Amino acid sequence: MARSSTLRTVAWLWLAATVAVLVVGFRQAIFLAPMEETMGNLQRIFYYHLAHAILGLIFPYINLAASLAFLYWRRRDPLKALTADALAVASAEITVLFVGITLATGMLWGKPAWGIWWTWDARLTTELILWLLYISYLMLRRFSPTGQTGVLSAVLAVFAAIDIPIVYMSIQWWRTQHPAPVFGPEGGGIDPAMVPAVLWNLAGWAMWGIFLIALRFAVERRHQIAEQDAALLALEASLETPQ
Amino acid sequence: MKYLGYVFEHLRKDLRLEWRSRDAINGMLFFVLLMVVVFSIAFDPAGYPSVTRQISGGILWVGLLFASMTALNQSWSREQRNQVLEAQRMAPSPASALFVGKALANMLFVLAVEAVLAPIFVVFFNLHVLGNAKLLALILPLGTWALVVNGTFFAALGLRARNRELLLPLILLPLSLPAVLMMVQATTGVLTGELDPIYLRSWITQLAGYDLIYTVVCVLLFETVLNAE
């Protein structure tokens, strides 16, 4: 019981810190960062779009790692495998959420900036297929037979992780319209005054994403433990029945 | 060598089963024929020959994709009758040989459908191939294998699922999107003759790479899926 209450305190503190960082990030992005030359205030959505896009590309790796861990521990250590499975489902759901927000903020920006909501450009299409793949992962979890959900979805997670680079490479060949990266060796970079807004928002949304994954993980663990208890009860009841 | 023997045995068994019932091929053939008719009515190909050339590559593959999906689920439900699949799981032969044999059999069925479909397609769509038509002999098998290898794998994966008929397209379509893009681009390039040969070669190479990667992954993971409990 003591462990659970400590965890709860940590969770509340983490949530409070997250909200504080997000408030600072909001102030930086909306009030302090300088106005962009050509796009004006419209560019400020970039601070949210970028943070969600980066995190939406990191969380699938958590899903892949957890799925591989599940496949490894499945026979060797079933209890650890169950934990890995809970982490896999938590990260997959939060991936869908973050990639969805990336797509939505991108569309909100695209309509005034490009004049269209959507275009079949390399990055946009890749992001959309990433979103579709993880939704199909969640669909499989819902439809698959009890007892096999973990294995089947872990296998699909491996396939999805292989698919994303292929999608990106093939569509890059097809067409590219998304603004070129501003960071990295080939990018033009951004005004140093914009950097705090980028970093505060990235940190805030990362903390928020981690909080959501942890929360979903805890819920999934409780599900699993409740199921185990129910199975144990049923087993005991069947033993007590007079033959 | 011994592995190839197992694969061949499985392939022979699947071909014999199909020869006796001819369910999969007949079903697919009629399905694709209906698709061609529906698309012809929807797009009026005779009126706009250049537009038809642009879109017929996509139509061909969409039809084949849907048709193969109708056959893929059946190909595993055959194994479920009389607990054949349980026997296969206990058999000492490698599990992936079962998968490779079945994927090859499905590939042959879809290729047979394509052989019948191609002339029908040319007639109904008034197609004149403007590019190098010999390349189609390379693109069609590569594209078919890309659909069939993943399709056979995920049909096995969803075998014991609730409403598995619905589950297969839900998983297979998002995963196959890059392959669909590659084969449609390559086929359209050949049909219109407008695509630069360097681009065309790149699409075909990418498609071959896709086939290779997924064949390896499917073979490696098949045993896990077969024994998923």
Image: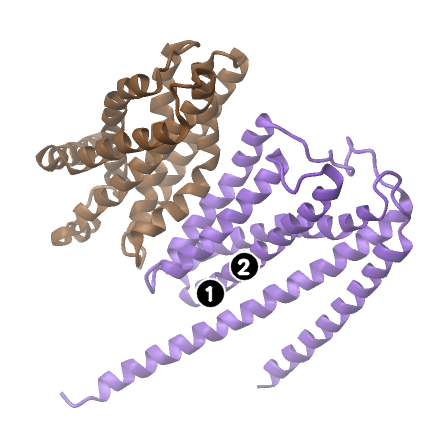
Chain colours: A purple, B brown
- Name the amino acid type tagged 1: Lys
Q: Nearer the viewer, mark 2 or mark 1?
A: 2
Q: Camera-side residue: A71 or B163?
A: B163
- State the quadrant of the C terminus of chain B: bottom left
Mark 1 element type: helix
Work out whether B15 lies above or below B165. above
Neighbor class of circle 1 (other Cα within 10 Å; few <14, some 14-19, many 20+) is some
Q: Camera-side residue: B162 or A218?
A: B162
Q: Chain of mark 1?
A: A
Q: Camera-side residue: B141 or A10?
A: B141
Q: Is residue A58 visible?
A: no
User: Which residue shows up at 30% across the image and 29% down it?
Assistant: B37
Snapshot quadrant of residue B105: top left
* Residue B138, position as x, y percentages in the image: 37, 17
* Residue A238, position as x, y percentages in the image: 23, 83
User: Which residue shows up at 61% across the image and 34% down it?
Assistant: A122
- Residue marked by disc 1: A80
User: Which residue shows up at 49% across the image and 40% down it?
Assistant: A162
* Residue A38, position as x, y percentages in the image: 86, 38
Snapshot quadrant of residue A186: top right
* Residue A13, position as x, y percentages in the image: 73, 75
- Residue marked by disc 2: A93
Mark 2 element type: helix
Work out whether B102 lies above or below A63. above
